[in-house]
Image (spheres, grey):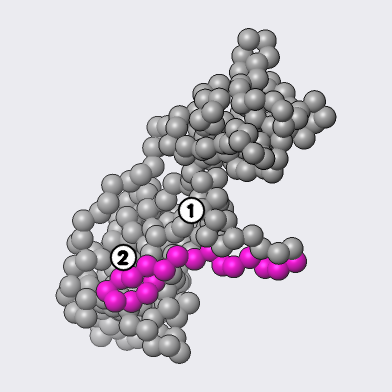
Amino acid sequence: MAMLLRTSFSDPGVIPRALPDEAAFIEMEIEATNGTVPQGQRPPPRIKNFQINNQIVKLKYCYTCKIFRPPRASHCSICDNCVERFDHHCPWVGNCVGKRNYRYFYLFILSLSLLTIYIFAFNIVYLALKSVKIGFLNTLKETPGTYLSHHVLICFFTLWSVVGLTGFHTFLVALNQTTNEDIKGAWTGKNRVQNPYSHGNIVKNCSEVLCGPLPPSVLDRRGILQQEESGAQGESNTRGPSVLEKSSSPESSAAQVCGAQTRGGKEVGCACSGGEQQPCLSECTKCSFSMPLAVLCSSSTGGDGPKHQFQPGAQQRG
C-alpha cells in the first residue's frame, strides 16, 4: 500500500511548460534557424540533435508545452504534460510513471506479485492437506464456493498478469530501457542502434534505475495558477489598438520620430512607424519603451531613419 500511494501521489517528473515570453523566444529562434517556409509547403521538423555516449539522440519539440523535450521525455496525452523519462501512463494508479516514481511503481508490482504468489500457494497447500484427510472431492464439497472463487481462481488468473508484468519490467530495468522505448522499438528496430543509456552491466543498470538519486520536483504545488489568456485579453482591451494596428493606420507615417506614445498620461505603445514589420522581443533602445514578447512592432525604413534594436533580456514595463 505504501508503494501504491507513493506511485499515485508522487510527481513522475513533470516538465514545466514554457512561459509566454519563453515560448515566443523559442519560436523566433526556430524561425530564424529554419527560415521562411513558402506557402503550401510543410515546415521542417523541429528537432535538435544531442549526443549521448557517442550516439545521436533527437530532442523533439512539443507543440503543447512549447519546449524541446529532454532525452527520453514524452508528452502524456492523458495528463497533458511532458514527463521526464516517460515510461507509461498507468490507469490503475491514476498517474504517469516516470523518472521520479518508477522505482515505487516497480516495487509496488513486485510486492503485489509476491503477495499473490503467497496467497495462491498457501491456498493450494490448504486444499492439498485437507484432501489427504477426507479426499479431494469431499474437500471440494465442504469448501465454500466463495472460498474457491475468491482465493483460488482470482489468485490464479491474477498471478499470470501481475507476475508477467513484473517480469517484463525486470527485463526493462536490466536493460535500462522504458516501456515507451520498447513499444516504439527505439533501440531494437531495424537500425539496431545501441542503447546509449545502458551501462552494459545488469547490476549497474538496476542500481541506476532503482537506487540512483532522484532529482527534485520542479512543480510548485502551492503556487497560484495565473490566468494568462484572460489576463492578456484584458490587458489588450485596456491598452487599446496594438502597435501593429497603429503602424498600419493612415495616421502613422515614416516621418514620425522614435518615441513612446502616451494616452491619458500613460505609455501605451511605441511610436516608431513605417516600413516592414519586425518582431519586437522586449525593448526599443531608441524610445526605451518595453514591449511584451511576441508583439510585432514596426521599424522605420530608409536612409538614416531610426531603427529598432531589441534586447531580449530587458525587463518589461507598462
Instruction: Give 78 or 274, whichever is nearer the viewer.
Output: 274
Q: Amino acid at mark 1?
A: Ile
Q: Residues within 10 Å of mark 2 (few under 14, many from 20)?
A: many
Q: Amino acid at mark 2?
A: Tyr
Query: SS class of the residue under badge 1?
Result: strand
Q: Check the picture and name the quadrant holding the C terminus.
A: top right
| Residue 213 horizontal side relative to residue 257, left or right | left
| Membership of 56 in magenta stretch | yes
Q: Position of residue 274 (x, y in %)?
A: 71, 35
Q: Which residue is mark 1?
A: 67
Instruction: Give 116 or 283, whichever is nearer the viewer.
Output: 283
Is the residue 53 above or below the residue 48 in the image? below
Query: SS class of the residue under badge 2?
Result: helix
Instruction: Give 280 or 185, whichever is nearer the viewer.
Output: 280
CA distance separating discs 2 and 1: 29 Å
Q: Which residue is mark 2?
A: 106
Specify the label residue 245 is tagged with.
none
